[in-house]
Amino acid sequence: MRLGIIGVGDRGKALMMNLMQVENAEVVAICDNYEPNYQRALKLSEGKVNAYYDYREMMDKEELDAVLVATPLHEHAHIVIDLLNAGTHVFCEKAMARNVEDCKRMVDAQQESGKILQIGHQRLFNLVYLNALEKVQAGDIGHI
């Protein structure tokens, strides 16, 4: 899969580093309009990715199978909707959007496009937290 990442701050950088080690996945483009994040991600990629300051330019120039969105929350809705409308699968970090209306617009765009939209939740599938949840539900650690 050819992947792009929009927003390579702390969370986007961590996801980028993880994705760079996944077989059958290649981070080919990054985008961030904050210069320190942009430069740090470019350095981490050892210059092996195309870098953009504007996600729309990245969308126009790159052939991507999916894009990960890890921008500040107020940017999620319009970026995700643009990506879905362009026919790209999207993984968007939590929270989905700032308000219910934007969330609904994102879902509507996903349904119209037929593309995958997944909202990521940090640590949701981490075994440490899943084991703790099991213990709570089983009553192993008492009333919380």
Image (spheres, helix red, strand yellow):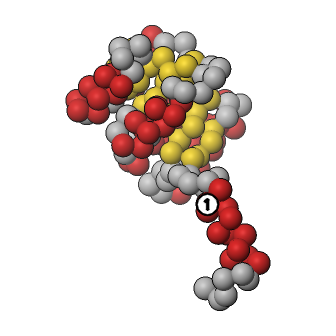
Q: Residue furthest left?
A: 35
Q: Quadrant of the C terminus?
A: bottom right
Looking at the picture, how far across and down is residue 80, in whole percent?
A: 51, 36
- Front in this rendered view, residue 83 or 51: 51
Q: Which residue is at 29% across, 33% downward? A: 37
Residue 100 shown left or right of residue 35 in the figure: right
Q: Which residue is at 59% across, 27% downward? A: 22
Whether residue 107 is visible, yes or no, is yes
Q: Which residue is at 22% across, 29% downward? A: 35
Which quarter of the picture shows residue 124? bottom right
Which quarter of the picture shows residue 115? top right
Mark 1 lies on residue: 128
Looking at the picture, how far across and down is residue 49, in whole percent?
A: 41, 16
Q: Quadrant of the N terminus?
A: top right
Classify mark 1: helix, strand or loop. Answer: helix
Looking at the picture, how far across and down is residue 76, in whole percent?
A: 45, 42
- Front in this rendered view, residue 20 or 27: 20
